Image (cartoon, rainbow, N blue to C red):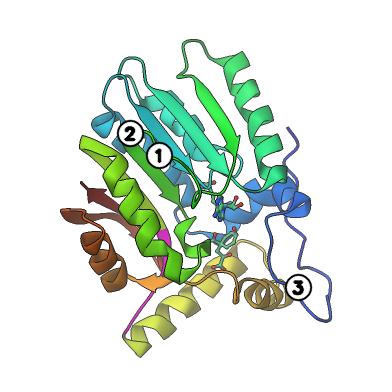
Amino acid sequence: MSQEADRLFAQPLGQVPDFVFNEDVARVFPDMIKRSVPGYPTIVENIGVLAGHFARPDSVLYDLGCSLGAVTQALRRHVKAERCQVIAVDNSAAMVARCREYLQAQDAMFQELLPVDVVEADILQLDYQPCSLVAMNFTLQFVATEQRPELLARIRRALLPGGALILSEKLRFEDAAEQALLTDLHLDFKRANGYSELEIAQKRSAIEHVMKPDSLQQHRERLLDAGFSRVVPWFQCLNFASLIALP
Ligand SMILES: C[S@@+](CC[C@H](N)C(=O)[O-])C[C@H]1O[C@@H](n2cnc3c(N)ncnc32)[C@H](O)[C@@H]1O
Ligand SMILES: O=C(O)C(=O)C[C@]1(C(=O)O)C=C[C@@H](O)C=C1
């Protein structure tokens, strides 16, 4: 599959439209997310490793907001529990179509991978099956804030004992100086990855109405309110973090 460079915000756009996960984004997504999210490759690979710990035999593993299925591929590489099935869900038709192609390519390269079902659906409308692992890798931040508690409560109710939710998000910081420093350092990360000032500014306008990061404290409180018993941060690089939430 072609690995196209992200040039989506390289030319002046005038009025920058809100960010959507459409065909243009899907085409450049592997390049975009690697150059935008510090630690992304490490997070994805290690979600597979963590899943190997939490996955229970005869259960479902969910990849919610799967995009092109990077996490699903890691789950399939690392989980050895018997008779598990991955359900990868995204509501972007463009992402789902390409995700299926990527997973077929993985099937052609490796034997005995976990079976996977790629579903085009809204994760807010899903009928959750009993599951031992739910991965939400940079997805919750795109769900409307007021819908986050109910979604997490539904996931919590579906999780089997011994399972886990792995939640990765861009963080906001309640301390203004910490927020300013980590925002600056994230911009440096983007510059170091070849993004111009124009690309950085236009991408920022595009995502500001559609992506609403919370603080670690907000995540922790909301997860505990949703019925999770413990929240364990396992990764942070600048303003991007990943948490393990235990049922
Ligand atoms: C930043 S991307 C996720 C990246 C992906 N998990 C990975 O690790 O490569 C966010 C994804 O969530 C999807 N998404 C956002 N809201 C959704 C919803 N309500 N239901 C299903 N998918 C959703 C978007 O279409 C997009 O593909
Ligand atoms: O915070 C930013 O500037 C980002 O580009 C982050 C982010 C994300 O966290 O999902 C936003 C949209 C794209 O999907 C890729 C990266």
* Residue occupying image coordinates x 33% and y 37%: 133
User: Disc 3 marks which residue?
Assistant: 17
Q: Does the magenta stretch include residue 54?
A: no
Q: Are marks 2 and 1 in contact (CB under 8 Å)?
A: yes
* Mark 2 C-beta to ligand 1 under 8 Å: no
Residue furthest to the left: 229
Residue 240: image location, x then y, percent:
41, 63
Q: What stretch is highlighted in magenta?
A: 169-174
Any part of residue 241 in sight: no
Quote the CA–CA distance across marks 2 and 1: 8 Å
- Three-letter amino acid code of the residue under disc 1: Tyr
Dot 3 crowding, Cα within 10 Å, few <14, some 14–19, many 20+: few
Q: Taking 212 as reference, is 238 left or right?
A: left
- Three-letter amino acid code at disc 2? Cys
- Ranked by sequence position, the earlier of labels 3 and 2 is 3
Secondary structure found at label 1 = loop
Give the residue at mark 1.
128
Q: Quadrant of ligand 2?
A: bottom right
Q: Label 2, on which residue?
A: 131
